[in-house]
Image (tube, rainbow, N blue to C red):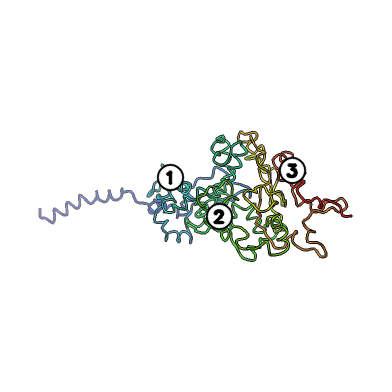
Amino acid sequence: MNAFKKYLLLLIIILPFAIINGCNKEKTDPKAEATASCEGCHTDYAHLQAVFSPDTAAPAGGCGGEAPHFEPYDRVFMGGDGYEAYKTTGHYQIGCTGCHKGTDNTGDKVLAHSGDFVRHPSVFNEQTCGNCHRSIVDNFKTSIHQGTGQKRKVAIRSGFSGSEDFDKLPAHQIEGYNKNCATCHASCGDCHVVRPPIAGGGLTKGHEFIKTPDMVSVCVSCHVSRGGHAYLGAAPGTQSDVHLTKAGYKCIDCHTGSELHGDGQKVEQRYAYSKLPTCTQCHPGLEQKNMYHTVHYKDFNCQACHSQDYNNCGSCHIHGEGARVPSYLGFKIAVNPIPDIKTGFNFTVVRRTLGAPDNWEKYGVPQYANFNALPTYNYASPHNLLRWTSRTQPVSEKSCSYNCHIRNEGGQLVNKDLYLFQEDLLIWEQQASTKITVDGKLPPSWFTAKQ
């Protein structure tokens, strides 16, 4: 048999096996290959819809109401302009597992999110963000966004001395705090990558890292019931703050990064923080601007004349029916409750707080051990300032004090509602808040009927 016939015979023998083997070979699914990585999965919207796990808990709620709901696949989808911008940054070069850990290069959702997977890396900012942003992370330990002031009050009313004792509270009470009160206190990512929990959570712009957070979707989401609600003029009968309407200021124009991130100096409450803005930084020499300022500069803080009515509420039943004194617009001037921190004036605007003796009843603490250690009205700085308010607007042919001094008209005390008196307190508030009421601390002539 010549060489050609040998080759032909060999081909006849081998070819059927090659065909059979080729037919039996498992075909590769291009779709599976495309989603076999973190990025591949999270940039494929249809795939995320196919594999998502439904939520097992309601969205976070808070003082501003219930959080909006975003579907799980919408919260983790990387797409749009934000994703394209993200791909051009150094954060993208780190890679998904560089921050989130877990397992890359797999299409198995369980495997990808197994082991040391971290859903929110900035919660562990020492090991993640701190690798490149060490000074910010170190200072953030003292940021007012850590909830230090709130933890301080809970600890003091529980019989301890301050925020450093918060971890000594019963475990169930701490659990309640984390579930109900900490939904706004942020880590780095809650401002710069994702929406805060109270805003619904999830990626803000396709995983883009946003240096300056959006005022409405980030800042106001957490500060809605007080700062944002007032600043935007959301309440019926109120106007937007003059700093918004006249200057177009956003939060960051006054509250700078060094304030929000912390400066490394520990404080026990937010008004003690050294980086807070003051009116005089932009308005120097206020005490000489007009006779009203000159006369009352050492009596009242600026908001006592220039703020509108603002949100108040009180007596929160944590994880129960919520605030039992529902949100209401009000205005009260009281004795300065923090004269050692906010110095230079005797009276200030105050806001009713959520503090109540049985705040933690649903978490195994029937009553605070030392509830009366702090008043139920806090020092307040409403962000709804106007030049002309119901107290500063002149009334024709009336004295300058007509709108704000208490006066006795035939036995009727006019303007008394502007001030916090003992009779304004609920029974359970009285012992805690009597010390800041104005009873006996205003000029006696205000209460004398004119002859």
Q: Position of residue 64 (x, y in %)?
A: 63, 50
**Secondary element at tag 2:** loop
Q: Residue at x 31, y 49 (%)?
A: 25
**Secondary element at tag 1:** loop
* Viewer can see residue 75: no
Mark 1 / mark 2, whichever is N-terminal: 1
Would you name the residue on which mark 1 appears?
Answer: 117
Q: Residue at x 55, y 55 (%)?
A: 275
How busy is the neighbourhood of tag 3: few (under 14 within 10 Å), some, or many (20 plus)?
some
Q: Position of residue 298 (x, y in %)?
A: 69, 55
Badge 3 vs badge 2, beta-carbon distance below 8 Å? no
Inspect the image, locate mark 3, and give the three-letter code of the amino acid beneath it.
Answer: Leu
Badge 3 vs badge 1, beta-carbon distance below 8 Å? no
Mark 3 / mark 2, whichever is N-terminal: 2
**Which residue is situated farthest in the right direction here?**
451
How busy is the neighbourhood of tag 2: few (under 14 within 10 Å), some, or many (20 plus)?
some
CA gap between label 3 and label 1 equals 51 Å
Inspect the image, locate mark 2, and give the three-letter code of the amino acid beneath it.
Answer: Lys
The label shown at residue 204 is: none
Instruction: Please state if 180 lies on the left or on the right of 8 as rendered.
Output: right
Badge 1 vs badge 2, beta-carbon distance below 8 Å? no
Up the image or down, 362 lies above or below 270; here it is: above
Quadrant of the drawing holding the C terminus: bottom right
Inspect the image, locate mark 1, and give the three-letter code of the amino acid beneath it.
Answer: Phe
**Secondary element at tag 3:** loop
Would you name the residue on which mark 2 appears?
Answer: 275
CA gap between label 3 and label 2 equals 34 Å
The label shown at residue 425 is: 3
